[in-house]
Amino acid sequence: MRIAYLNTLGIPARYRGFETCVEEVSTRLVKKGHDVTVYCASNSNSRYSSYEGVRLINLPHSTRKFVDYPLRQLLSTLDAISRGFDILHYFGTDSSIFAVVPRILSRKVVMSLDGLSWNRSGYPGWVRCALRLSSWLPLYVPHATIVDSVSVREWYRTEYGKCPIYVPYGAKVSPRDADTNVLRRLGVENDRYILFVGALVPEKGVHHLIRAFNALNAESGFDLAIVGGNPYGSAYELSLRELAGDHVKFLGSVYGSDAENLFKGAYFYATASELEGTSPALLSAMGFGNCVLVSDIPENLETIGDAGMTFRNMNVSDLSSKMLQLILHPNLVEDYRKRAVERVARYYSWESVAQRIEEVYSTILGGK
């Protein structure tokens, strides 16, 4: 099959779950003999024309998010139509309107959705309103719609009576053998920091994490390590830095083996997301043997099962209390670490994700 991926920042993954999914799936499909192309934002991937056998097409990129995404979707859609791909796979609710043209032209269209985007607190009101009003489009424009969360799937079933295909994200399982030299270079000490990884946007709730961590006794000896950024720049990130105390460390964007070592060396992983699909960063943390502490939104509860601790969403006091509980009870942390690895190994695998998405493509190409 000739497959194109549209409406992400591209690969290698540098920002969020969509990019991680595209990287993990596309590279596996290439190994199976498929011809795969990924459309990328030129500033982040312009030095690459291919990546592990995947062809990359770099497009102009704007630093203004709500200009950048529509512009790149339009350009990538026009280019993809001209190249005659068998499958055009879009990512994000906002792709729906751009997918109309290839659908009219009888191209096979697949769309992946994550959380309910119109609930994102970082979006302007007019964007949230537009996304909510058009929330029915992803169920009717594509030939197949994929979601990574059972909770999100059930929302669409209840609201519109149509059920998207559930395909969760994956993660790899690896032993906790962090390279202490790498950790030292990054400014943290093995088993003496709490880790967060993700985009620095309001709905990720990093401000809750920092406030809860600041409330702990500074003499605890732990740091809060924050990995991630925002490719469009962000007043929110500046506000986080102003809020942070001495033991909060902003490590910026970290990838590859350095990121793996950060996961492996953390005492526990914490996320205070107010809105999610299935978080690849959370799954990665679990696969690398982390105890995880998460907000009790349905998507996080679905991901961790009984393999992690929760706190009440947006409740800083409860979050701080749970942080302290884990710091004071290393046996509890060790128990959750074992459960996390077992859960990822049993339920989440990038190999199975790639296989299931390949089956979706084959099914719609077969006329179903």
Image (spheres, grey):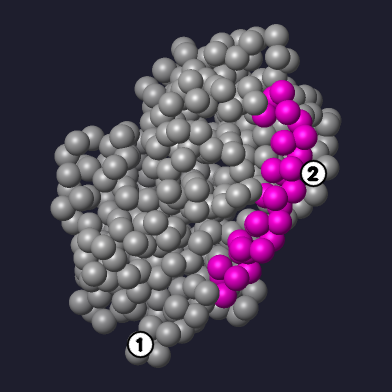
Rendered position, 180 above or below 37: above
Q: Secondary structure at mark 2?
A: loop
Q: Amino acid at mark 1?
A: Lys
- What residue is pinned by disc 1? 368
Q: Amino acid at mark 2?
A: Arg
Decide if residue 127 is on the left or right side of residue 86: left
- What residue is pinned by disc 2? 176
Rendered position, 247 above or below 336: above
Residue 85 or residue 157, whichever sits in front: 157
Q: Is residue 257 visible?
A: no
Query: Residue visible at 16% across and 53% down?
Result: 133
Distance (Cα) linking label 2 and label 1: 44 Å
Q: Secondary structure at mark 1?
A: loop
Decide if residue 364 is on the left or right side of residue 21: left
- The image shows a total of numbered marks equal to 2
Q: Which residues are magenta?
A: 326-355
Residue 348, by quadrant, is: bottom right
Check disc 2: other Cα within 10 Å, few if <14, some if 14-19, many if 20+. some
Q: Position of residue 159 (x, y in %)?
A: 22, 61
Residue 172 or residue 272, whichever sits in front: 272
Decide if residue 236 is on the left or right side of residue 257: left
Q: Position of residue 245 (x, y in %)?
A: 56, 11
Residue 349, by quadrant, is: bottom right
